[in-house]
Image: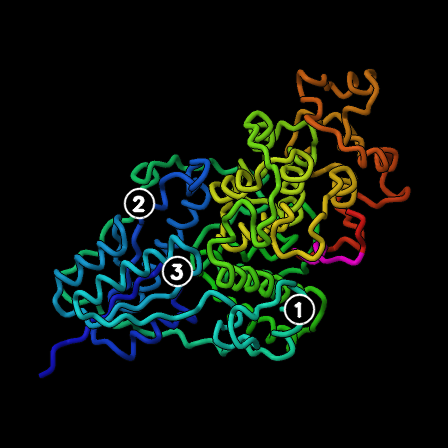
Amino acid sequence: MSASRTVICLLRNDLRLHDNEVFHWAQRNADHIIPLYCFDPRHYQGTYHFNFPKTGPFRLRFLLDSVKDLRATLKKRGSTLLVRQGKPEEVVSELIQQLGSVTALAFHEEVASEEKFVEKKLKDVCCQNKVKVQTFWGSTLYHRDDLPFSHIRGLPDVYTQFRKAVEGQGRVRPVLSTPEQVKSLPLGLEEGPIPTFEGLGQTEPVDDCRSAFPCRGGETEALARLKHYFWDTETRNGMIGVDYSTKFSPWLALGCISPRYIYEQIKKYEVERTANQSTYWVIFELLWRDYFKFVGLKYRNRIFHMNGLQDKHVSWKTDMTLFNAWKEGRTGVPFVDANMRELALTGFMSNRGRQNVASFLTKDLGLDWRLGAEWFEYLLVDHDVCSNYGNWLYSAGTGNDPRENRKFNMIKQGLDYDNNGDYVRQWVPELRGIKGGDVHTPWTLSNSALSHAQVSLNETYPSPIIIAPEWSRHINNKSSGPPGKGRKGSSYTPRQHKDRGIDFYFSKNKGF
């Protein structure tokens, strides 16, 4: 009788059972499967340049939820998730030595250098122990091998060209089936405890009732969110609430949901209900996410370099007084401050908020874009290394953006997306007494108006740390009267600005 074959399925940012090629392959090539997740200590150290914590409290809670959920899913199917604290290459080496029956290690490939370093170490361990390594690509909607370019070097440097090429010539692979039963673990393995916040050097976050993302991590929650978004709600667009955008990004970042499964459900929805702008923009967002992954593959470590993809030299500042005002939401520019406080208190910020605060940091304050990128890496619940650094390169004008000198006008943006000021008042409560759109520019109000609103500049709320000259064009266009005169009510978003994620980036209207 032949020896039993054991496959270790190392899970990283693919914490799901559905449409997971690692499990799909292992089921066909093993007698026993070891699903494994490692809490890598390197993920809980400091960021590369500025030593901010690498994993913040909201993302850690989301990750712990996701690990617990996958373990529960696997237990229902005759397996469990092994959890270890340690470097994956060391944990895998120990398992190979302990068991003596491991024939293969299977995992999904990643893009960025730290993850590729781990992959190299894993391959070295397996080579030394004569264990096969089986890798897969599974983080994007379009498979890397199916792109309509002969080599990744042929990836267009303009997103629109990429989108048109894949929409015209690409194909989305079908979703892989979910196993009803997962092959058992070999005998004698302890599943291992799931670590606590304290064990990873973190403090558990406090829930904020204002959060636009009060959701928990895990495949079960991801699939429920998808069902809710497509089948239970009418999609909306704005700055406040849970349903103004898909909110799939945190689950996508950890691989709790497959982009191909989202695509499949969109196509089903379009057949059974309707194809509309909303369903198109969900695919558009998935393509944008794909694009950043492929840009990461093409340019590798250049996505982290100060001079960016174009090797463009800019005299960035590292004024920590300005940076601290930005990160703490104390710039005196309410639209910026509201977004930064939302991020600090919930781990989430809308796409338009991210573009605006990034533009403010890089174009108005002239600060090193990597300060912002590493702060986002710390706090974002949906941090995805390629999307985050790719977006910051764009904002800094050092990416591959055709409109590289884009600068957002904070006052115009605030009035366009929060014209009545409800979002600002929600996150900057010291300005609650200022009615309507005036809340975006408290420094322009008379002393009597400020006194009436119980606002004292530089005491209860700061004066702006900078005033850009272009802001003056919009200061007299604020909506301070009742809804219905000119602009519409509190959560109204002007039609031309309905941006379903990132499309306003590429708008033909250059009035930022």
Q: Nearer the viewer, residue 222 or 168?
A: 168
- Labelled disc at residue 161: 1
Q: Is residue 262 visible?
A: yes
Q: Residue at x 38, y 66 (%)?
A: 108
Write down the quadrant of residue 400 in the picture.
bottom right
Q: Which residues are magenta?
A: 502-508
- Residue denoted by label 2: 41
Of badges 2 and 3, nearer the viewer stands: 2
As measured in the structure, the alpha-carbon distance from the residue carrying label 3 to the one carrying label 1 is 32 Å
Amino acid type for the residue under numbered disc 1: Gln
**Mark 3 vs 1, N-terminal side:** 3
Amino acid type for the residue under numbered disc 3: Leu
Residue 296 position within the rendered picture, expressed as x and y whole percent measured from the top left:
50, 59
**Mark 1 vs 2, N-terminal side:** 2
**Mark 2 vs 3, N-terminal side:** 3
Residue 303 position within the rendered picture, expressed as x and y whole percent measured from the top left:
52, 53
- Residue denoted by label 3: 15
Residue 339 position within the rendered picture, expressed as x and y whole percent measured from the top left:
63, 38
As measured in the structure, the alpha-carbon distance from the residue carrying label 1 to the one carrying label 2 is 40 Å
Q: Residue at x 61, y 37 (%)?
A: 315
Question: Residue 351: within the magenta?
Answer: no
Of badges 3 and 1, nearer the viewer stands: 1
Location of residue 24 with respect to 55 vertically, above or below = below
Q: Is residue 495 visible?
A: no
